[in-house]
Image (cartoon, rainbow, N blue to C red):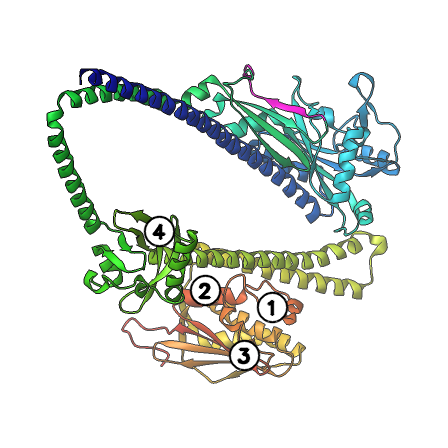
Amino acid sequence: MRRDSYLIPIIIFCAGAFLALSVWWMTEGWEREDIQAQLNHQGALHTAAIQRELKLDIGVLVGLRGLFNASDKVTRAEFAIYTRPIATRHPSIQALEWIPRVSHAFREAMEASAQLDDLKGFGFTERGAGSRMVKAAVRDEYFPVYYVEPMAGNEKVLGFNLASSAIRRVTLEAARDSGKILATASINLLQTKEKQKGLLLLAPVYRWPPATLRQHRQALMGFTLGVLRLSSLMERAQEHFGESNDIYLELFDITAPKPEQLYASAGETPQAGSNVFKAQEEFEVAGRRWRAIYRSSPAFEQAHQRVLPLFLGIVGLLLSALGALYARTLLIREARVQTLVAQRTDELEGSRSRVTAILKTAVTAIITIDTHGNVRLFNPAAERMFGYSAAEVAGQNVKMLMPEPYQSEHDGYLHAYHTTRRPRIIGMGREVEARRKDGSVFPIHLAVGEAETDDAPFFVGMITDITAQKAAEQALLESKQKAEEANRQKSDFVNMISHELRTPLTVLLGYLPLLQDERMMPDKAMVAQIAIDMDASGTHLLELINDLLDISKIESGKMELRRQRVGVEEALDTVVTQLRPKAEAKGLTLQREGECPAASANADPFRLQQILINLVGNAIKFTDSGHITVSCACEDQALLFHVSDSGKGIPAAELPHIFERFQQVDNSSTREQGGSGLGLAITRQLVELHGGEVRAQSTPGAGSRFSFTLPRWEDDDGEDTAG
């Protein structure tokens, strides 16, 4: 007994010490894996930040290309106005440039044109011996830096022929042939005194949309170019990461067979070794492939180290010593063993009681079943969820809580699991449907685990009602679809209105050259016709602008009505008289029906006239033959106006949407007649501002009828003067 009282504790201590050292070694390995994972994560975030900054800068270039695509000619002043604000928002952009394609025949003209823009001494240049800038040699075509902003600090590059460099010429030709925005290899910036590396982004601009390689080469007009400072780009990407100073970054361009270093963090490079962690990310940048290599510094490793391995080792040794001491104590005090066993038994019973209490008070529904699928436990949360009492469910097959097809498949699934031991849901969670006592079906999240006791194994199901979550997901999806539809409608409207604005401007600008040269002055009849066409175009342009201003005022809540007493007969006669010549010009009859001799509206007279002109004008526009009728009827507290026509009518599917903003009936008539498409939206808003309502009825092929109400004018004593 005395010998065992020392031998057994020593064996226990040695075994415990070995186990503690093993745990320390394992946790040390896990910690290193965690540090590596943290470095990988920080590297991925940092790479994403670099890509985000590059996308923002590329987006600037796309916008600049759009400026040239939208205009026949962009002047140097227009280029400066557009690009100067960009420098403050994008510090990584050293310069934005316009690189036109210039044949040798137009070289002198282009140089002279630039000199007229106060660029004295401007000429096409290229690098000569000793990297000095010299006059560009004679070539078939040139790609000079013609516009540059900001001008300060970038004067050296004006006139520089990018095609004089073989490497840059390859990128120019690749961008030209592909139509894509491409980047060059790194360059030493001419604009900076210190030696800084930069990057050129080239976006081709075409005179017309090309479809073939030959058309790409023929249609090329030039390039918009962005000069990026790589150091500023990296500094901007690092602003969002507090731990970036603890990570050393090296950035390489690996497009060429020999990688080229683009950037390296300030400070000393961590020496490669067993204690240095390394991660790398590769990504595409405008046709080139970059590699970012991240190395940990001692500060990074120290920030992510934990005391857990050392703590576990020390605790393990202490526990081993305590275990040995305890074993020796047990051997010495053998008489107390039975007491300790009884104490542990009592603790086990207490634990069982606590488990039972937890099951009863748990918010989550918990159900246990045996290997045959029969319910053994049905906690109160499950009773509340399914509407059954525990007594009703106990001993019944759990499939009574399932709708089809789960109910029919459940027994087969249990059999397959017992046979193959391959789970489909056990040990994991999934979303399924369940059925309550009242027969209603609802979505749940079900997690099933398998447990074993001395008598038999059983399964534990944890069930959460996710009805609210599914409803929220559906609402979010519907909101997203509505937002996408609104954005699509707005884009269609912007495309349409840009076309409508350009059409009258084209007429005006097309006639001006005929009137500027006295030698080419047409005869008086032609001048009169030109004046009529220009007046019509100007009027159409004014109508479009007024529609845009009105819808803007209404949406911003700044539209104010100047209500007063307006005679209905006078208002209708004014509109009919004003628009009758337009109707008769199309062979239509515009007439009045009904009379309200004493009726007066409580309205803004200008806006009432605008409402009537919009509705009658639309009727004239979309009626090819027949008649248009304008009428008014008196109701108790309101006046009811009608505008009817015998036109083509409106399709039933489009009728509910005709008063919406950014909405047009998509048919050939709409496109032929033109217009902003805002008239009916403005009409509805103006009517509703007066406290009335507007509606439309239409039968395709038979005509349409638009009706709206306005409040009647009442005297101070409340008596209606229009009655």
Q: Earlier in the sequence, mark 1 or mark 3?
A: 1
In the picture, which quadrant includes the C terminus? bottom left
Q: Residue 468, how many percent across, how many down? A: 34, 57
Q: Amino acid at mark 4?
A: Ala
Q: Earlier in the sequence, mark 3 or mark 2?
A: 2
Residue under label 3, please give it: 704
Q: CA distance from mark 4 to mark 1?
A: 51 Å
Q: Nearer the viewer, mark 1 or mark 3?
A: 1
Q: Secondary structure at mark 3?
A: strand
Classed neighbour count for the residue bearing mark 3: other residues with Cα under 10 Å, few (<14), some (14–19), many (≥20): many
Q: CA distance from mark 3 to mark 2?
A: 20 Å
Residue under label 4, please give it: 447
Q: Which residues are magenta?
A: 258-270
Classed neighbour count for the residue bearing mark 1: other residues with Cα under 10 Å, few (<14), some (14–19), many (≥20): few
Q: Residue furthest bottom?
A: 594
Q: Secondary structure at mark 1?
A: loop
Q: Amino acid at mark 2?
A: Gln
Q: CA distance from mark 1 to mark 3?
A: 17 Å
> Where residue 666 is drawn, which disc sits there?
1
In the rendered structure, are the residues bearing label 4 and label 1 in contact, judged by CB atoms less than 8 Å apart?
no
Q: Nearer the viewer, mark 3 or mark 4?
A: 4
> Taking 361 as reference, is 125 above or below it?
above
Q: CA distance from mark 2 to mark 1?
A: 22 Å
